[in-house]
Image (tube, rainbow, N blue to C red):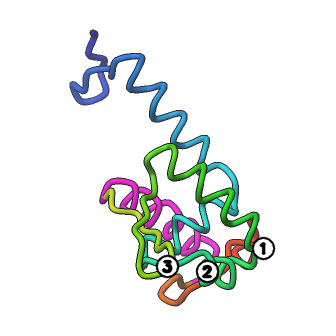
Amino acid sequence: MSTGSGGGFQDPPAEVLAEAAASFGLLATPARLHIVWALAQGESDVTGLAERVGGTLPAVSQHLTKLKLAGLVRSRREGRRQVYLVDDPDVVTVVRLMVGQLAERAGHSVRKPVRLRELGA
C-alpha cells in the first residue's frame, strides 16, 4: 500500500472500501438516514420511529430490516415490542457529524428532533 502526500495515511484494502461504500449506500436515502439519526439519539420501536420520521409502519419496518441486515442497527425484544438501536459509536459519530454540520450550514439547530425534509433534503 502506498502512502501519498495526504499526511502519511495508508490506503485501506479494497474490501474495507467496499464495506464502507455499502454502508454509506444504505444511508444514502433520506428515510434511512433519518431513522439512524433518530436511533442515534436513543432507542425506539417501529411505531415511535414511524411517528418521528413521518413514514408508514411498513416502510419504516423495511428500512430497519435493511439496516439491521447490514449491521448498522440492532434490535432487542422488550415484551411484545422490538426495540431498535444503533450501538456502533462510529456510525453514530459519522451520522451526527454529517447531519449536524449540514444543518448548521443551513442555519438550523439539531438539538431537538428534526425531520430531514425540514432541512431541505
**Mark with earlier residue (1, 3):** 3
As measured in the structure, the alpha-carbon distance from the residue carrying label 1 to the one carrying label 3 is 15 Å
Instruction: Kindly state the secondary structure of the residue where label 1 is placed.
Output: loop
The magenta segment is 89-108
Structural crowding at the residue carrying mark 2, measured as other residues with C-alpha within 10 Å and reported as few (<14), some (14–19) or many (≥20): few
Seen from the viewer's position, the closer of residues 105 and 25 is 25
**Mark with earlier residue (1, 2):** 1
Q: Amino acid at mark 3?
A: Ser
Q: Residue at x 50, y 60 (%)?
A: 98
Instruction: Kindly state the secondary structure of the residue where label 3 is placed.
Output: strand
Instruction: Kindly state the secondary structure of the residue where label 2 is placed.
Output: loop
**Mark with earlier residue (2, 3):** 3
Structural crowding at the residue carrying mark 3, measured as other residues with C-alpha within 10 Å and reported as few (<14), some (14–19) or many (≥20): some
Q: Position of residue 119 (x, y in %)?
A: 69, 74
Q: Which residue is mark 3?
A: 44
Q: Position of residue 57 (x, y in %)?
A: 73, 73
Q: Residue at x 41, y 16 (%)?
A: 14
Q: Which residue is mark 1?
A: 56
Furthest residue to the front?
A: 80
